[in-house]
Image (tube, rainbow, N blue to C red):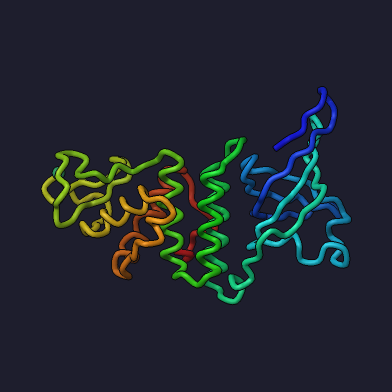
Amino acid sequence: MSRGGAAGERTFHASPAFLVRAVDMGEADRRLTFFTRDAGVVSILAKSAWRSRKRFGGLLQRYVLLDIVWTETAGRMPVLSTASVSESFWTIVEDWERVRHADYLLELAAEMFPQEGAKPRAFGMLLEGIRALAAGEAPGKAARRVEAAFLGIGGWGPDLSGCRKCGRADSRWYRFVPPEGGALCESCATGAGVKLSLGAVKTWKALQAGGEAARERLRVPDGIADELRDVIPCYIEYCLGKQLRSLGGAQ
Ligand SMILES: [Zn+2]
């Protein structure tokens, strides 16, 4: 949301947000990168006052759903006005695997949806994933759900309706080949790509297609979660054309 003014005037913006990263700037200021529902990725300057622990405590932390307000002036970095906690997910910091996966989901959101503008579906999925981690869902399974949904929202697919070459949908196994944008059946596979069971392909397809309710009902067996761990993050890196920092070992 924004309340605009004439050119050169300050405009005010507000959105639910997650803090993705914070970088110190000079002696006192910090540059905060948020993933927001209503403006996507925004880098915002937090003036020195925001560092005062007495005033703001642990407000500007990760794993907390915030409501932030910031001001923008043409040619300048946006400046944080206020921030308040909307929902806390403190149980994430009780477990290192949850922390690593929460960091991964935050990075993933910012990397997969860097364009300006509202991102309600991606933001909703990120929130769902952070909530699931805080509620104690197996971190790897929560991450696969978010990854599959992000790929679908971002339009990366993949097409999992059948073999990319012959269309066969009942092969016992497939090989997932990123440049094909999908998988090849046992007859068409050449040895390239990563082997996936039919169950893993079907599960990925269901994760991609389902709404929140469907995803929550879907039970992903451990074996299939392991198969998908070896494929989905790699496909995301292939789509992005870069490696994800927090992915190393975070799968
Ligand atoms: Zn085939």
Residue 180: where, in percent of width, then height?
Answer: 28, 40
Task: Please indicate, yes or no, whether residue 27 appears anywhere in the rendered image.
Answer: no
Residue 28 vertical placement versus 251 (above, below): above
Q: Which residue occupies the foreground of this view, 6 or 178?
A: 6
Q: Is residue 127 above or below residue 181?
A: below
Q: Ligand 1 is located in which of the four quadrants?
A: top left
Residue farthest to the front? 213
Across and down, in percent, residue 214 comes to 37, 55
Kindly give the residue lying farthest to the left in the view shown. 187
Q: Residue at x 48, y 64 (%)?
A: 250
Residue in the image at 48% along x and 51% along y: 243
Residue situated furthest top in the rendering: 7
Residue plotted at (87% across, 63% down): 55
Quarter of the image where one finds residue 19: bottom right
Q: Nearer the viewer, residue 218 or 140?
A: 218
Whole-percent x, y for residue 189 in the image? 17, 48
Q: Is residue 136 above or below residue 107?
A: below
Q: Quick one: 59 or 75, which is closer to the camera?
A: 59
Note whether residue 184 is visible. Answer: yes
The spot of residue 64 in percent (x, y) is 66, 61
Quarter in which the C terminus is drawn? bottom left
The image quadrant where one finds the N terminus is top right
Number of numbered tags placed on the structure image: 0
In this image, 190 relative to 231: left or right?
Answer: left
- 190 to the left or right of 36: left
Q: Is residue 134 left or right of residue 183?
A: right
Q: Residue at x 14, y 52 (%)?
A: 171
